[in-house]
Image (cartoon, grey):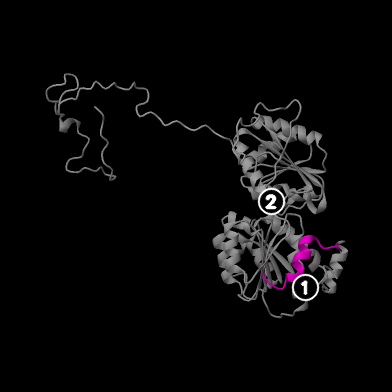
C-alpha cells in the first residue's frame, strides 16, 4: 500500500528499491483523485512527478492495450526537465515490461524516429520537438490515454500556445489530463484548464506565495556589476554549502561571470540555452557527480534541475517575474532540506525586488557584508507597494529657454507689421519659399506640411 492505494507489485518493488515509503503532501492529495482530470498547484521539490507518474504506470500495467500507439504523453517546457522526468520514469519501467522514450531538441531526428518506431508506451517530450515529429507523421497520439502538462505556465511563457493547441488536436478526446505546476496563477493556464480539462478537480497543497519554511531569503544591495562580482566571490568563499547555483538573465553574462569566478574558485561550470544538448548533459553530469560544485546559469536551470546538495542559490540578476524567482530559489530547500537564497539588488532592480516580494507576500531579509557595503542604500521614499516613490514631473514650458513676452495691451491692426505696428506685412514669395506642394495640401506620405515660424 502507498498513500492507501494497492499499486501493482512491480510499482511497489520500484518504490521499495528507491527507498520511497511515505507519500508527500501532493502525492497524498493527488493519488486518490487520479481517476479524473486534475489541475494541481504545488511547490517545487514536492514530488509532483511521482504524483502523476504512479497512476499512469498503474493503468498501463493493469489494463492491456495490444496494438496501440503511445498511451501516455508527458509534455514539459525544457530539455532539462524532460531528462529529469525520463530518469524518474525509467527507474520504474526498468522493473516492468513498459517502455519510455524522450523527445527533445538538440538530437538527430533519425535516431528519435527509430525510437518512436519501437512504440514506447510512455513518451516524455518538449513541445517544439514533438510538434516537429507530428508534422513529419513520425509520432501517433490517436491512442493516448494520458496527457500530462508539467509546468504548463512555462510552456505558455515560452510562446508554445499554438504548438500546444496543435498537439491537443492530435490527441484522443477520451483521455485523462493532468495539469501541474508550481504556479497556476496565469491567464493562459486558466484558458487551457477551461478548454482542455473536463470536470477537473483543483488541488493546491502549498501556494507559491506562501512562506518557504526551508529557504532563508536575503537581499544585499549592490552598486553595479563590478560590486556584484566582489560580493559573489565573498559569498562563495564564506557561505557553507555543498553545491551552489548562480542565476543570470543573459547568456553572455553567464560566460563572463563563470570565467571571472574561475580566477578565484575551482569547480565552476556554466549552463545556458546556446549550448548543445550534449554539452548541457555533460555539465549537469559533472554537477551531480560533485566534480563541479558551482553552476552559473540562465533560467534554463530554473526548472527540472534536481541536484542533491544544492544548498545555495544566488540571484546575481533578479528574475524578471515572480514565478521565475520562485522556481529559481526552488532549486534549494527541496524535500525538507534547508537552503539559502540571496539576491544581489542594484538600484535599477529595486522595483523588481518589490514586485517579487509582493508576489511572494514575503519580504527578503536585508543583509550587509562588512567591507563590501554599497553606496546605494535604497530609495529615500517608497510607495505602499514597496516601489520607489518618484517626484512628479513638472510640465515642460511651451517655449523653453525663451523669456515670456509681456503683454503691452495694444492690439495690432489686422495685417500690421510687428516692427512698426502699421502697414501691411510683405507677402512671401510662394514659388521660392512655399513648403506646400502645388495643387496638393498633403505630402507624399499623407501628412500636412509643417508650417515654419517666421
Element assignment for label 1: helix
Left or right: residue 317 versus residue 390 is right
Q: Give the quarter of the figure containing the C terminus.
A: top left
In the figure, residue 27 lies in which quadrant? bottom right
Farthest top residue? 420
Between residue 397 and residue 172, name the one nearer to us: 397
Q: Is residue 29 magenta?
A: yes
Q: Which mark is residue 12?
A: none
Q: Is residue 283 magenta?
A: no
In the figure, residue 161 lies in which quadrant? bottom right
- Residue 89, can we see it? no
Distance Cα–Cα, label 1 vs label 2: 33 Å
User: What residue is shown with label 2?
Assistant: 209
- Residue 375, can we see it? yes
The first of marks 1 and 2 along the sequence is 1
Between residue 100 and residue 110, name the one nearer to us: 100
Residue 335 on image: x %, y %? 81, 54
Between residue 264 and residue 299, name the one nearer to us: 299
Is residue 205 positioned above or below 117 on the image?
Answer: above
Farthest left residue? 423
Is residue 128 positioned above or below 280 on the image?
Answer: below
Residue 153 on image: x %, y %? 62, 57
Q: Give the quarter of the figure containing the N terminus.
A: bottom right
Give the extent of the magenta segment.
Answer: 20-37
Amino acid at each position: 500500500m502507498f498513500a492507501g492505494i494497492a499499486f501493482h507489485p512491480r510499482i511497489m518493488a520500484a518504490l521499495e528499491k528507491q527507498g520511497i515509503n511515505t507519500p508527500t503532501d501532493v502525492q497524498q492529495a493527488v493519488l486518490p483523485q487520479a481517476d479524473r482530470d486534475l489541475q494541481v498547484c504545488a511547490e517545487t521539490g514536492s514530488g509532483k512527478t511521482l504524483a502523476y507518474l504512479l497512476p499512469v504506470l498503474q493503468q498501463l500495467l493493469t489494463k492491456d492495450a495490444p496494438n496501440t500507439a503511445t498511451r501516455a504523453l508527458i509534455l514539459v517546457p525544457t530539455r532539462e526537465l524532460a531528462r529529469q522526468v525520463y530518469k524518474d520514469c525509467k527507474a520504474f519501467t526498468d522493473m516492468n515490461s513498459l517502455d519510455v522514450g524522450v523527445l527533445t531538441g538538440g538530437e538527430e531526428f533519425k535516431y528519435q524516429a527509430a525510437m518512436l518506431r519501437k512504440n514506447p508506451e510512455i513518451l516524455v517530450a518538449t513541445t517544439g520537438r514533438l510538434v516537429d515529429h507530428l508534422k513529419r507523421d513520425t509520432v501517433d497520439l490517436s491512442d493516448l490515454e494520458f496527457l500530462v502538462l508539467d509546468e504548463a505556465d512555462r510552456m505558455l511563457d515560452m510562446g508554445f500556445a499554438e504548438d500546444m493547441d496543435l498537439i491537443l488536436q492530435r490527441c484522443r478526446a477520451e483521455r485523462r489530463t493532468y495539469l501541474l505546476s508550481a504556479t497556476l496563477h496565469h491567464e493562459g493556464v486558466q484558458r487551457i484548464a477551461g478548454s482542455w480539462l473536463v470536470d477537473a478537480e483543483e488541488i493546491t497543497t502549498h501556494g507559491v506565495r506562501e512562506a518557504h519554511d526551508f529557504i532563508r531569503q536575503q537581499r544585499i544591495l549592490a552598486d553595479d556589476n563590478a560590486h556584484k562580482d566582489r560580493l559573489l566571490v565573498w559569498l562563495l568563499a564564506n557561505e557553507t554549502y555543498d553545491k551552489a547555483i548562480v542565476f543570470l538573465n543573459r547568456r553572455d553574462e553567464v560566460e563572463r561571470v563563470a570565467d571571472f569566478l574561475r580566477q578565484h574558485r575551482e569547480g565552476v561550470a556554466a549552463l545556458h540555452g546556446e549550448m548543445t544538448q550534449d554539452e548541457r548533459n555533460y555539465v549537469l553530469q559533472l554537477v551531480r557527480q560533485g566534480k563541479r560544485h558551482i553552476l552559473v546559469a540562465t533560467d534554463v536551470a530554473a526548472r527540472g534541475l534536481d541536484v542533491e546538495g544544492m544548498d545555495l542559490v544566488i540571484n546575481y540578476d533578479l528574475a524578471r517575474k515572480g514565478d521565475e524567482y520562485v522556481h529559481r530559489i526552488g532549486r534549494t530547500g527541496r524535500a525538507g532540506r534547508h537552503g539559502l537564497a540571496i539576491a544581489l539588488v542594484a538600484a535599477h532592480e529595486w522595483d523588481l525586488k518589490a514586485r517579487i516580494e509582493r508576489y511572494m507576500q514575503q519580504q527578503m531579509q536585508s543583509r550587509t557584508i562588512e567591507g563590501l557595503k554599497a553606496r546605494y542604500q535604497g530609495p529615500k521614499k517608497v510607495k505602499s507597494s514597496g516601489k520607489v516613490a518618484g517626484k512628479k514631473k513638472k510640465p515642460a514650458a511651451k517655449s523653453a529657454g525663451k523669456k515670456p513676452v509681456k503683454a503691452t495691451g495694444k492690439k495690432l491692426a489686422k495685417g500690421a507689421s510687428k516692427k512698426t505696428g502699421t502697414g501691411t506685412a510683405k507677402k512671401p514669395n510662394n514659388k521660392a519659399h512655399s513648403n506646400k506642394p502645388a495643387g496638393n495640401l498633403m505630402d507624399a506620405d499623407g501628412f500636412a506640411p509643417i508650417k515654419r515660424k517666421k
